[in-house]
Image: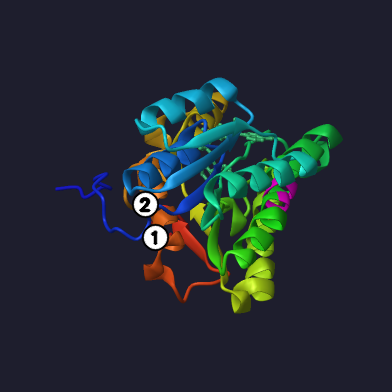
Amino acid sequence: MTMTATGSRWSDQFVGRAVMVTGAASGIGRAVALAFAREGAQLALADRDEAGLAETLRLTGTNRHWASPLDVRDGAAVAQFVSEAVDRFGRIDCAVNAAGISGPSATPLADLAEEDFDRIIGINTKGVWLCMKHQIPAMIEAGGGAIVNIASGAALVAVPGSGAYVGSKHAVLGLTKAGAADYASQGVRINALCPGFTRTPMAMGSLAAMGLGEADAAATAPIRRIAEAEEQAEAALFLCSEKASFLAGHGLVADGGHSIV
Ligand SMILES: NC(=O)c1ccc[n+]([C@@H]2O[C@H](COP(=O)([O-])OP(=O)(O)OC[C@H]3O[C@@H](n4cnc5c(N)ncnc54)[C@H](O)[C@@H]3O)[C@@H](O)[C@H]2O)c1
């Protein structure tokens, strides 16, 4: 039998906890939001896609959550979002920063357009930093917390033709370590999740753009399949949980063994 994430609740530790999720309108961010909702958390959901955000809110099936449109590149808007979340819930206990984009996947580094580089770094890297910049003081104020930044397998090794994405994700892992070094002593644990190929609109779109199918992606990992977004969500919840109490600045690789071969 193939064991995958079951969607069953695994503890009471997140009941009533206030959790901020970016990229919550789709894919991994939505799966993270729904997993935290299942665990009884109160959610502050952010994404620039308003319709997708409303659908995630609907899927949570309760009215205890809050969602608001947010472009993670906008520092003032991120500050306002965090402040409003604290006003509503009294604190932020956990944050999962999943907003991100893919970018060109077959463009050698020297051929990359400057605007593509700025866009990818702006969302994937600066966006994560801006979120941490405002989440960290709120967590310190509340006595501690946990942040999970969604990086990528491309945070660890290069992917040919995807230079800006690779650079943006290596930087996410670097910022995760830097944040952990600065704030672990104040009770804020910051870690990253490095997913392998995961079934989301972004990933399936990237595959199609390269003229590839799911079987091609599945063949690159010893586990011989791609991940479901729910499996990445469970890994993110683990990093936020008390079970991960001694993890700081870690990049957890959830890639079905892709990076070991
Ligand atoms: N799917 C994979 O195979 C995979 C693998 C490794 C890493 N990741 C990472 O996981 C994260 C989630 O990706 P996904 O696959 O779920 O993609 P997705 O496209 O399904 O979801 C990404 C979400 O981010 C939002 N977003 C994009 N730019 C934004 C901005 N400026 N402000 C606010 N929200 C913004 C989008 O609207 C979307 O809802 C990304 O950081 C991605 O790089 C995905």
- Of all residues shown, which one is farthest toward the top? 51
Q: Amino acid at mark 1?
A: Phe
Residue 63 in the image: state x and y as whole percent.
41, 32
Give 131 or 27, whichever is nearer the viewer.
Answer: 131
Give 61 or 116, whichever is nearer the viewer.
Answer: 61
- Of all residues shown, which one is farthest toward the right? 114
The numbered mark at residue 3 is: none
Residue at image position (62%, 75%) is 186
Q: Which residue is mark 2?
A: 234
Q: Which residues are magenta?
A: 126-130
- Answer left or right for 60 relative to 184: left
The image shows residue 247, relative to residue 107, as above or below, that is below
Could you tell me what secondary structure mostly forms the magenta stretch?
Answer: helix
The image shows residue 140, relative to residue 95, as above or below, that is below
Q: Secondary structure at mark 2?
A: helix
Q: Is residue 190 visible?
A: yes
- Answer left or right for 138 relative to 1: right
Q: Amino acid at mark 2?
A: Glu
Q: Is residue 228 visible?
A: no
